[in-house]
Image (cartoon, helix red, strand yellow):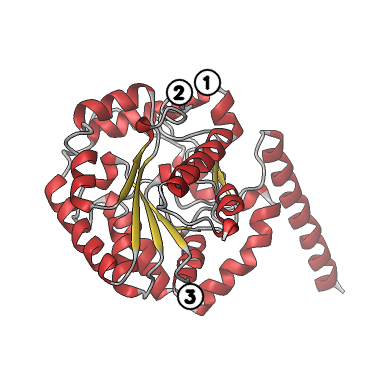
Amino acid sequence: MNLKNSLILATILFLTGITAWEMYWRSKGYYPTLNDDKDLWSEHRKKVDDAQKNDIVIFGSSRAYFDFQVKTFENFYGKAPIQLAIPGTSPLPTFHDLVNNTNFTGTVIIGVTPGLFFSTTYPKASPWSRGQNKVDYYFDKTHAQWLNYQLSIPLQQNFVFMSADEEEWDDDIDLKSLLRRIHLKSRLGKDPAPPFYYFGDVNLDRNMSMAQKTATDTAFANSVISVWKFFGSLAPPPDKKSTTEFFLKDLDAFKAKGGKAILVRCPSSGGLRAAENKFLPRNEFWDQLVELSKVDSYHFEDYPQLKELTCPEESHLSKEDAEYFTLEMLKIMEHDEALTNLKTN
């Protein structure tokens, strides 16, 4: 009888604690979100193995992730793309995986963010390893990890306290993140990185949209801009030669299999665009890549309906502008016969 009472009391205390914790964070403006993690990426990478000739796979960093809206793409094209872009990464290791480990011969759209695309081929460098780690996880994932992920989805979608993103945002609320917020003074006298707050929402289709707060709260958007400035100041010089050679080798192999590639330069604006113009000038990076690649290529500045788009935090489009960008870019590709609209055939 005592054990039964203890179990009941423990259950009541557990549920009370969880409820209070959930309500507390909701009162702070948090809402349930899906974790953008390696499990979600690997679920979509799996789709490539069964993809057909008319399928489209998107590679790139966060701009290709935020700016191509999956539902808008599907509504226009007639089929949802397989979204494999990864924030903060070079697309080279993930495209390499597709070329060398799949039989896919459809179309790939590769977002070119100059600072990441031309960054490095060094395996331990962050822009490379972040993407390669997801590829490795896809091949090494166990059945237990797959089951754990499937069971976690309903919890992630309904409970705020389940937030535990791999990106380690400064406003995450899992225990590890809360402890990480206890900052001790640096004994080396170096300035700490500015806080980096979560600014996008993802769903099971791996559609990433800018959070409304980022698009409407200037102070919050400026906090993200400060992060771009901080990391930009630490970025090593680009490795244009090795990255270009690596990409062209895979591109030639993909073309030889019958695949089609499209390059896209998504919008940036403000001070970040000015820095890109200074340190990664278009004529030396994008234009030369296009010339060597010999594939359909699209730069947002070449189109009057796209070149004036403004990014709230200088690097990504708001949800509404991303939907517009997706639709207009697909119209341009259809007009150029770079893509064949499945809905009209």
Badge nearest the viewer, 3 or 2: 3
Sequence-earlier tag: 1 or 3: 3
Indicate which disc residue 50 carries: 3
Sequence-earlier tag: 3 or 2: 3
Mark 2 = which residue?
A: 222
Q: Is residue 45 left or right of residue 125?
A: right
Residue 78 seen anywhere in this rendered image of the structure:
no
**Quarter holding the C terminus?**
bottom right
Query: Vertical placement of 95 versus 227: above or below?
Result: below
- Amino acid beneath label 1: Thr
As helix, strand or loop, the secondary structure at mark 1 comes to helix
Whole-percent x and y of residue 273? 32, 27
How far apart are labels 2 and 1 at the CA level? 6 Å
Q: Are marks 2 and 1 in contact (CB under 8 Å)?
A: yes
Indicate which disc residue 198 carries: none
Whole-percent x and y of residue 39? 50, 64
As helix, strand or loop, the secondary structure at mark 2 comes to helix
Q: Is residue 279 left or right of residue 226?
A: left
Query: Vertical placement of 230 versus 291: above or below?
Result: above
Badge nearest the viewer, 1 or 3: 3
- Amino acid beneath label 3: Asp
